[in-house]
Amino acid sequence: MSALRPRTALFPGLLVTTTAVAAGLVPAGAVHAVSGPEAAAGQHASVVKLNIGDEATGRGCTGSLVDASWVLTASSCFAATPGTTLPAGAPALKSTVVLGDGKRIEVAELVPRTDRDVVMARLKTPAAGPAGITTASAVPAVDADLTAVGLGRTKTEWAPGKAHAGAFTLNAADATTLTITGKGTDAVCKGDTGGPLLNAAGELVGVNSRSWQGGCLGADPAETRTGAIAARTDGLREWIDGVRATTPGWQTKALVQAGTSLYQAVRLPDGSWTGYTDLQSKIGSLGGIRSTAAAGINGDTHVLAVSTSGGLFHTVRKPDGTWGTFGDVFAVANALGNLTQVSAVSIGHDLHVVAVADGKAFHTVRNSAGSWSPFRQINGSLTGVTAAATASVRGELQVGIVSGGKPYHTIRQTSGTWLGWGNVAQAVGATGPVTSLSMAGTGDEAHLVIATDNGTRQYHTIRNFNGTWAAWGDLKGVLGSVTAKSVSAAAVNGELQVAVTTTDNKLLHTTRHTDRTWNATVPAPLVGITGTPGDVAITATYTG
């Protein structure tokens, strides 16, 4: 790496009279790299090169893969004129990301920050292989040791093709920038703009923005300064995750209750997860939340929350990440006493909700216009209900409940009439007492996932459209030996996804494919959650 330079580094031959340029700082653009040593093989696999415009005469920058579809880099790399605001949307010039293996992927979309030199760039096709970079949650302390990484010039190479890393010290920080100085002769050079600035833990704290470029190949031989400025990235996790959540394709929205809070995250099409957001902090406090349900409708995510005081509330997350306020469901669908649990599923554009209250199961519908029908008890013969689940199959609502520790099943036909309750154990086989259950519909099948024996055993079965049931499948071979607090199932792009919270405070996730094989179960990250994970609900949405 080499040092900070004026904006003419990004825009050769163009003199810009900005404060940064007057100070001698310029974006470390064009085609060059950090003048430190070459990084060890695989050490910075998420670092990529960007070519903006013609590869021979255009600009070169560095960026960091956040996930398979998004690169975090500097807005100044793409700005048409130095110092101007970068508009969101497709880049003005053809822009290409070059991965470590040499593969080139075109940039489809830019989402810039308005307060600092940072932009998220979406790839036209996902990058396979390298893991995304982790963003730090706090600014480093003054005098902290930092590492800058880039694919620009070095002291001796014009375009090295491999990432180089330099050692830096943090001099100062303001609300949006970090001022750093290279140790020894390490500096940020041309082509390093947009590259990552890392703390001792390898977490991203900044994006290279401007430098003096002292000692860089092609720089003024009289320039010896190795100072640089980076745009701060700590504290941007929610913004980054919000941008990532606009990735086109099928997504899994996850709701996790922990303590008295409810958190929401997204599993993206590439299988990576965003961090979690505290909904009460974002939308408004309900005085605590103890249970939840979710359903996707036309790109929206409908969320039901049972408050600690026994109320039932509803809100909607739009595809752009904005949330509506919590609405009081009991105020529009009549109140229920002793509410303990809720389940929800979409049928067309209608939201079907089943609530467990006073040991009974009740049903209501929110139609596409936003109107709620009154709660009505489902087939009033069963009492002592402790849990409920819902699924949509061929436009019909299927409901599972637990009564006396046993699972029961019924169907609400498209005419609105209900079939009688059927004892699932009589059709599938007996298990220990059921403590949690969830359902999902894929094609003509209804999947039922249960936890029994105080959560120590988990099973899966399928109800075929002709009314026959498959035998219980023991999920120990899929989930391992775990004790489940809560299970949730969802149909995502025709496949069954299952999420489980466990007594050792993990959230496990797996997928059952249409060929009946299961993915290896993996712990899902719980970034942003404070407290012990309890109730979980997942649902599918599609972002176009």
Image: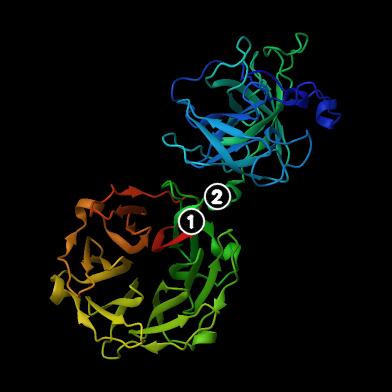
Q: Identity of the amino acid at label 2?
A: Asp
Q: Is residue 342 above or below residue 335?
A: above
Instruction: Give x and y (percent) for residue 349.
Output: 47, 74
Q: Would residue 200 be visible to someone looking at this image?
A: no
Examine the image and state in which quarter residue 230 appears: top right
Q: Residue at x 31, y 78 (%)?
A: 386
Q: Which residue is mark 2?
A: 241
* 266 relative to 94 in the view: left or right: left
Q: Tell me the SS state at disc 2.
A: helix
Considering the image in quadrants, where does the N terminus appear? top right
Q: Tell me the SS state at disc 1.
A: strand
Q: Which mark is residue 343?
A: none
Instruction: Give x and y (percent) for residue 327.
Output: 56, 77
Q: Residue at x 65, y 40 (%)?
A: 91
**184 or 52, nearer to the observer:** 52
Which of the marked residues, 1 or 2, is nearer the chain's N terminus?
A: 2
Q: Residue at x 52, y 20 (%)?
A: 162
The answer to whether marks 1 and 2 mark residues whose Cβ atoms lie closer than 8 Å is yes
Q: Which residue is mark 1?
A: 265
Instruction: Give x and y (percent) for residue 211.
Output: 72, 24
Instruction: Give x and y (percent) for residue 355.
Output: 39, 80
**25 or 345, nearer to the observer:** 345
Check the image and tell me how it is coloured. Answer: rainbow
Q: Would residue 522 be visible to someone looking at this image?
A: yes
Q: CA distance from mark 1 to mark 2?
A: 9 Å
Q: Identity of the amino acid at label 1?
A: Ala
**279 or 80, nearer to the observer:** 80
